[in-house]
Image: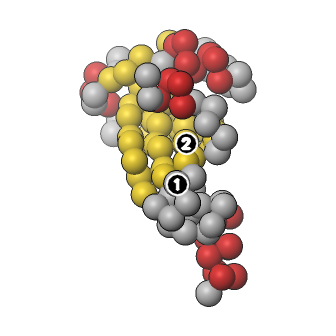
Amino acid sequence: MGFIRKICSVFHDDWCSKCQSKMDERKRQLYMLPMTVGHYVSHSNLDYYKQNLIKVNYKADIPTGTYACGIIVYECPKCNHRAVKLSIFLPVRDEEKYEDGMYLENGEMDDFIWK
């Protein structure tokens, strides 16, 4: 059973990399990015996201042709390890055209998420 848990933790975002348990979704939030179609630039510096993400409640609140970022915070119920998944996408006709993403496990976005 331990072998299967290790595989799940490698291939699934919601499995803890520390203790190989299924993590709970603690928070989910949608943001808008100040980039439009044809002007997308991938950013590896997290400060860009911390300074430019604009919180929205619904996908319908995002203007046409503007990129969005979904953030999901996972927390392990056994060891309390947290992970954050950022998914950058372009909302197009009720679909999400995935552009980029990051998976962070060392608290890099904690100051932004829990402010």
Closest to the observer: 90 or 111?
A: 111
**Residue named by callout 1:** 80
Q: How many marks?
A: 2
Residue positioned 52% across, 54% down in the render: 80
Judge whether 60 appears above or below 103 on screen.
Answer: above
Residue positioned 28% across, 30% down in the render: 58
Scheme by which the image is coloured = secondary structure
Residue positioned 44% across, 29% down in the render: 114
**Residue named by callout 2:** 84
In terms of secondary structure, where does tag 2 sit? strand
In terms of secondary structure, where does tag 1 sit? loop
Asked whether the viewer can see residue 73, the reply is yes
Q: In which quarter of the image is the C terminus?
A: top left
Residue positioned 46% across, 29% down in the render: 113
Asked whether the viewer can see residue 33, the reply is no
Inspect the image, locate mark 2, and give the three-letter code of the amino acid beneath it.
Answer: Val
Q: Distance between the residues labelled 1 and 2?
A: 13 Å
The image position of residue 17, as x and y in percent, is 66, 60
Quarter of the view holding residue 21:
bottom right
In the picture, measured across the screen, residue 102 lies left or right of residue 64, that is: right
